Image (tube, helix red, strand yellow):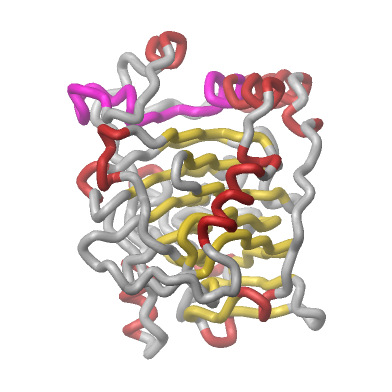
Amino acid sequence: MELPMPCHSLFSLLILISSYGFANIEAFNLTTISFDEGYAPLFGDGNLVRSPNGRSVRLLLDRFTGSGFISSKMYKYGFFSANIKLPSDYTAGLCVAFYTSNQDVFEKTHDELDFEFLGNVEGKPWRFQTNLYGNGSTSHGREERYRLWFDPSKEFHRYSILWTEYKIIFFIDDVPIREVLRTSEMGSEYPSKPMSLYATIWDASNWATSGGRYKVNYKYAPFVSEYKDLVIEGCPVDPIQQFPVASTSCSESNARLESAEYATITRRQRMAMRRFRQRLMYYSYCYDTLRYSVPPPECVIDPIEKERFKDTGRLKFGGSHQSHKRRSRRRGRPHVDDRTI
């Protein structure tokens, strides 16, 4: 288990990272939509609160239920993005997830791309992980875990997932933090079936903070995550027939995705991504030699990263969105999709 970073060391690191210009990369030119244009409530009843103008939404977790929303359509590749602000103060045991999945349709062969934000005890920073699953390959989790260079509870920051036929890129504030290029060796484990976009907040006390040592404390409830400036770009398809349900073909939509400004990582962005990964990534499955004696085929081994993670060992990561699914069922709530890592 990794020892926590001293406060003065973390502060120095954040100053150093800021000097590298993470926050100064030019923002993407994105078209936002209202909640009703692209999304629908998933679970949580009154714990999902839309703004009067429909341009933002709050998700609450209390002792009775969490909450979530889902895209109104499924997409065969796309760009999914939102400005998100996380709960503050004591957030141990919380998981705030922003992710794509198709488990409701493809229960045993589902695909998934995750941002999962993991709460912490008061005074300690949020941490988060990204993950990738393809064709039900839950035994081959592709987790990476990171620190942030800012406090995500103080103001909104943009989190985005680009998913095309050839690549997957995770962004924070238009800084790419992870890129997965499709390889022939990945085969069906590259996500390739239509997915919906989800946003949820739920009780993950059994794993989210120090392996479940610290639980959700409901005296601090309700816990509130906020979402605005919602973006979906992609081709809506029928999840079974995989036929376009929009007037344009998926080939045209996919071509627009591939040519969009966010689909090409500039030299400056690649430098920022490298700095982020060298300084703030503290777990990568690619360097977990006890878990994978041979790195999965999409892994690009960076000698500097490899040196950092030479003693990673068999770390325990992940959890299950099933936890809030079970909680919702007990309270008579709609069933919530997801997977067990």
213 relative to 84, above or below: above
* x, y percent for residue 163: 50, 48
Which residue does the image show at 81% across and 80% down from the upper left?
53
Q: Is residue 282 left or right of residue 17?
A: left
Q: Which of 191 and 4 is in front in this view?
A: 191
Q: Can residue 103 be seen in this view?
A: yes
Q: Which of 166 and 317 is in front in this view?
A: 166
Which residue does the image show at 40% across and 30% down from the upper left?
283
Q: Is residue 336 left or right of residue 220?
A: left
Q: Is residue 199 visible?
A: no
Q: How many marks?
A: 0
219 relative to 311, above or below: below
* x, y percent for residue 161: 55, 49
* x, y percent for residue 285: 33, 31
Which residue does the image show at 36% across and 76% down from the upper left?
327
Which residue does the image show at 45% across and 51% down from the upper left?
114
Q: What residue range appears in magenta?
A: 275-295
Quarter of the rendering containing residue 340: bottom left
Q: Quadrant of the N terminus?
A: top left
In the image, is residue 284 part of the stretch drawn in magenta?
A: yes
199 relative to 240, above or below: above
* x, y percent for residue 166: 45, 40
Q: Is residue 319 left or right of residue 117?
A: left
In the image, is residue 287 part of the stretch drawn in magenta?
A: yes
